[in-house]
Image (spheres, grey):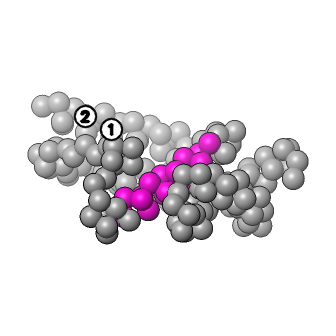
Amino acid sequence: MTLSMAHDDLAAARSGDTAALERVLVHSRQDLRRYAEYHCVINDVEDAVQESLFTVSRKLRDLRVLECFVSWTFRIVKRECNRLKRGRRMLSGDAISDDIAPMVSHEPAEWRHDVAAALESLPAHYRRIILLRDLEGLTIAEIGEQLGLTREAVKSRLHRARLLAREYLAC
């Protein structure tokens, strides 16, 4: 597959063309498998590739720069390999080393309560737009379509909602 054809398929897949998505996934599968063979336990290679392809198909619309597709997919595979290694180590009782342990930072419960209170303090139309964008992960265009607003109106309302939430949290 030529680079321009792959880029065209990638752009079409990102915009919702299922046939193009299938071509992209089929084209990517062998490279992802080779990469997974290097990073996964041999028994987990196929599982990691399958889960990664599933993640790619669900999250492709969120990819902002198409030129980053290859490195993005490799990061997904590596993350999946690490997840499978952690699961295997937890089952076996072995210590989980720093090279695969996730860097988790738990925020204090008070922060969650503060954010929830900030969202509750917002007028309903601002709260809804923040939830659609930041919780559900919809794009500006999708929010505009769902709420019947222009792109500019969505961006303006989202900016204002975040500003009000920041003001609430600063107090």
- Label 1 secondary element: helix
**Crowd band around label 2 with a 10 angstrom C-alpha radius: few (<14), some (14–19), many (20+):** few
Q: Is residue 5 left or right of residue 48?
A: right
**Is residue 84 on the magenta stretch?**
yes
**In front of the other: 118 or 123:** 118
Q: Is residue 79 left or right of residue 12?
A: left
Residue at image location 77% in from the left, 58% down from the top? 27
Q: Is residue 155 left or right of residue 53?
A: left
Say which residue label 2 marks.
166
**Looking at the picture, how far across and down is residue 78, in whole percent?**
52, 51
- The amino acid type found where label 2 is placed reads Arg
Q: Classify residue 124 by image quadrant.
A: bottom left
**In front of the other: 156 or 6:** 6
Q: Classify residue 20 by image quadrant.
A: bottom right
Rounded to the nearest angstrom, the CA distance separating label 1 from label 2 is 6 Å
**Looking at the picture, how far across and down is residue 17, in whole percent?**
73, 63
- Label 2 secondary element: helix
Which residue, as the protein is rendered here, is positioned at the far right? 2
- The amino acid type found where label 1 is placed reads Arg
**Looking at the picture, how far across and down is residue 95, in whole percent?**
28, 54
Say which residue label 1 marks.
162
Q: Which residues are magenta?
A: 71-87
Circle 1/circle 2 CB separation < 8 Å: yes
